[in-house]
Image: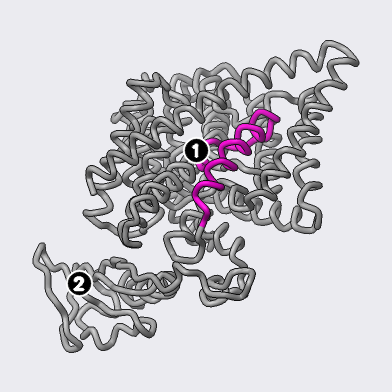
Amino acid sequence: MVLEGIAVGIIAGIVVGTFRWLLTIAEQMRRRLVIYAGSGIEGVMVTFLLLMIIAVLVALLLRFEPEIGGSGIPQIEGEMKGQIDQNWARVLIGKLAGCVLAISGGLALGREGPSIQIGAMLGKGFARTRHTVLTEERMLITAGAGAGLSAAFGAPLAGALFGLEELHKNFSAGVLITTLSASVASDFVTANILGVVPVFNFDIEYRIPLKLYWAVLTLGIILGLLGALYNKTIDFMQNLFQKIKIPEMRIGIMFLTSFALIFIFPLALGSGSNLVTEVSAGRMTLIGILILFLVKYLFSTASFGSGAPGGIFLPLLVLGALIGGMYCRILGVTFGLDQKYITAFVLMAMTGYFSAIVRAPVTGIILLTEMTGNFYSLLAMSLTSLIAYVIADLLGAQPIYDQLLRKRMGKSQSVENISIDESGKRRADEDKKVIITTDVILGSYMAGKTISKINLPHGCLVVSINRGGEEIIPGGMTVIEAGDVLEILCKNSDIAEADRRMLVRCRTLMK
């Protein structure tokens, strides 16, 4: 699996690195188009025509392969739960072309979610061409997803942790080693062979002193509140665009908005990765950051809500940076805070906002730490992320990718309904067997209970218990202990239900 992970990582590094290079060219062309649009009536007409052509092409690609819509991370999570079976080749082609077109047209979407989906589909394609078993395929999908994130951000550790924290939601040594192998190989290819640098990279010269940690605590609370609001806004935008019955009109509306912003507020166009450097360097005023945040917030959530191919990963980090910049400026006005700390507050806000929205705090902390190479702010980043996470959780906000997956599958759909294709026949992959793992935490229902009490879906079976490095082949009266890792054999169609039951019985504290 290590060798296969390396192979997937190399392939993902080449493809995602090329994808980023194409996006760089597309963004350069968009900047030139913005300048050309202001040259006169001819420029206005040509710009309008080009954006409408791009809108039509994006709409056609969505008809060609609907799974390319959005960031792609919910689709990967659905794949891991056995709810979705993506055509890896069609998704790969459609996502590459669709995302390049959408971002070149100015939509405020990110490239990192698509990079994760592209990497995952490369992992799936690698597994399918080698005719691997489904358990191995799922590991290679995870490895490819981690490699995609690593190639996008230059952060191999964050790529490996993303696979555990977001896709599997539990620790597995096999998944960790395979995904880490792919992430390291991918980062090596993009950085040392293709020469692609991270999306943004800045140093923190001044870390937050302990006497200012009250400001860190307050920032965490604010980020938790704003993170919960962001998730609700995404849901609102999706519901709003769903009222437009013709999908092509949804895409067309967003490109018309992009056309208007070329003349009104061009800074809001695109993912906005360059804005992080501007804010962290202290080059923007409080009013300027506030206006930019409001416009960017509405445009980015609407861009995603339209269903266009592109992610929210990078846009939400940019919004977090703007929040950090505003917060530091406000502290400067009200309490006379030295603005030399603005970069540190930008970094903390990016991490905390990510934690509140995605609910993957460890991934966020490691990601931003790897990108900056600065460990001095680790305590402040961790504290901000923890508080933001707790506040968003107390408000009842769902993790954004879980929310998107549930919305995509439909609240009324059961696992059985999802497993039926358009012809009414069951998918061939539905009855394939797969092994999933789950931890048993201290204080959960199953800690101290026999396996006979586990209540798995019919046909699922606990085949192994890993206890302190020792493998136990269980029977019905085997007692499960806290700290055990259970290996469960089940059908592909039962993954989601088995995982849901294990979350309740093995990974949740009893009240």
Q: Residue at x 26, y 67 (%)?
A: 439
How many circles with numbers are drawn on the protein? 2
Choose top left, top right, bottom left or bottom right for residue 101. top right
Q: Residue at x 34, y 38 (%)?
A: 9
Q: Is residue 96 magenta?
A: yes
In this rendered view, identify the residue nearer to me: 450 or 122.
Answer: 122
- Against 475, residue 421 (above or below) is above
The image shows residue 466 at horizontal and vertical percentages of 16, 67
The range drawn in magenta is 86-114
Which numbered disc, 1 or 2, marks the residue that appears first in the sequence? 1
The image shows residue 37 at horizontal and vertical percentages of 80, 17
In this rendered view, identify the residue nearer to me: 451 or 449.
Answer: 451
Residue 182 appearing in the image: yes
Horizontal side of residue 65 vs 115, given as left or right: right
Q: Of all residues shown, which one is farthest toward the right?
A: 41
Amino acid type, mark 1? Glu
- Against 40, residue 376 (above or below) is below
- Say what secondary structure mark 2 lies in: loop
Q: Residue at x 37, y 43 (%)?
A: 146
- Say what secondary structure mark 1 lies in: helix
Choose top left, top right, bottom left or bottom right for residue 412. bottom right
Mark 2 Cα-neighbour bin, 10 Å: few <14, some 14–19, many ≥20: some
The residue to which callout 1 is attached is: 112
Mark 1 Cα-neighbour bin, 10 Å: few <14, some 14–19, many ≥20: many
The residue to which callout 2 is attached is: 482
Horizontal side of residue 194 vs 106, given as left or right: left
Are discs 1 and 2 less than 8 Å apart at CB? no
